[in-house]
């Protein structure tokens, strides 16, 4: 995740680079406005109630500007959500130890999923997967795929250092790395402070050793 920028700003697609001159400015600014509007609308009303009309009104553009970019509400959601997720894939530097890498990964999850605005969107998307299997499959590919790929790097380094068995169950290992903290954050089941993260890191490292 980029420094000095809120994950909310990154999800919304707010520009942080100098924009090109000429006609490209209009195109980029319109796309940015639509991105911001869609995520705000999604957080406030949920996917089921969100409409292309509402996103267009909030963005201050005509519906045609949206349909020139995406053929449907679902296509818009998946494209912008996947782009946001890829901009926020946990980048955990090699700390030199499995415990350090696990803690670094958990810290990134807290910084992202701990935001109330992001949490509302995530919970709504989880609910949608139960109503639309097709959307659920697409969301898992767009959202879960990149995050699990990033978590896999933590496992791979652990194996290379000899801290984890070479035959580790990777799918189970990824579940251990990602799921406990996400559930606590998304369901707001209690504080996530330094002491909790330290204990969770110890438990995950122990679990990975026998996965």
Image (tube, grey):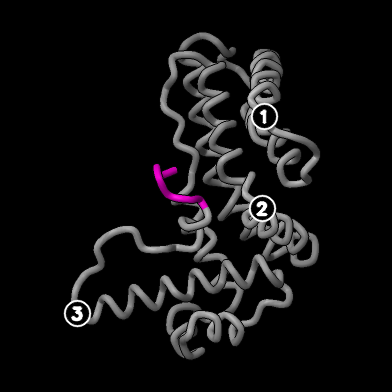
| Quadrant (top left, top right, bottom left, bottom right) of the N terminus | top left
Q: Position of residue 82 (x, y in %)?
A: 51, 58
Q: Residue at x 49, y 70 (%)?
A: 35
Q: Which residue is more in the foreground, 40 or 93?
A: 40
Is residue 66 shown left or right of residue 178?
left
Q: Residue at x 66, y 59 (%)?
A: 121
* Residue 95 part of the magenta segment: no
* Residue 4 part of the magenta segment: yes
Does 134 appear above or below 164? below
Q: Which residue is more in the foreground, 158 or 170?
A: 158
Q: Which residues are magenta?
A: 1-7
Does 101 appear above or below 133? above
Q: Answer yes or no: do the residues labelled 2 and 1 have beta carbons within 8 Å?
A: no
Classify mark 3: helix, strand or loop: loop
Q: Position of residue 101 (x, y in %)?
A: 51, 22
Report which residue position mark 1 lands on.
193
Does 36 appear above or below 108? below
Q: Which mark is residue 159?
A: none
Q: Answer yes or no: do the residues labelled 2 and 3 have beta carbons within 8 Å?
A: no
| Quadrant (top left, top right, bottom left, bottom right) of the C terminus | top right
Label 2 to label 1, Cα distance in Å?
16 Å
Q: Position of residue 94 (x, y in %)?
A: 42, 22
Report which residue position mark 2 lands on.
116
Does 29 appear above or below 60? above
Q: Residues within 10 Å of mark 3 (few under 14, many from 20)?
A: few
Q: Residues within 10 Å of mark 2 (few under 14, many from 20)?
A: some
Classify mark 2: helix, strand or loop: helix
Query: Reading the chain from its start, which is encountered first: label 2 or label 1?
Result: 2
Circle nearer the viewer, 2 or 3: 2
Classify mark 1: helix, strand or loop: loop
Q: Which residue is more in the foreground, 197 or 161?
A: 197
Report which residue position mark 3 lands on.
22
């Amino acid at each position: 995740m980029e420094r000095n920028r809120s994950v909310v700003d990154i999800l919304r697609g707010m520009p942080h680079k100098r924009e090109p001159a000429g006609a490209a400015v209009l195109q980029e600014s319109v796309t940015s406005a639509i991105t911001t509007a869609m995520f705000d609308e999604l957080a406030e009303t949920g996917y089921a109630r969100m409409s292309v009309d509402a996103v267009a009104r909030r963005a201050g553009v005509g519906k045609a500007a949206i349909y020139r970019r995406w053929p449907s509400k679902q296509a818009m959601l998946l494209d912008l959500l996947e782009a946001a997720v890829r901009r926020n894939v946990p980048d955990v530097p090699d700390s030199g130890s499995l415990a350090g890498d696990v803690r670094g990964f958990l810290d990134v999850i807290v910084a992202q999923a701990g935001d109330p605005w992001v949490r509302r969107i995530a919970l709504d998307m989880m609910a949608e997967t139960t109503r639309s299997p097709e959307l659920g499959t697409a969301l898992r590919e767009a959202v879960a795929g990149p995050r699990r790929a990033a978590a896999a790097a933590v496992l791979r380094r652990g194996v290379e250092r000899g801290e984890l068995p070479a035959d580790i169950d990777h799918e189970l290992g990824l579940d251990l790395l990602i799921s406990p903290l996400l559930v606590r954050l998304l369901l707001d089941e209690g504080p996530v402070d330094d002491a909790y993260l330290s204990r969770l890191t110890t438990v995950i490292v122990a679990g990975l050793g026998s996965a």
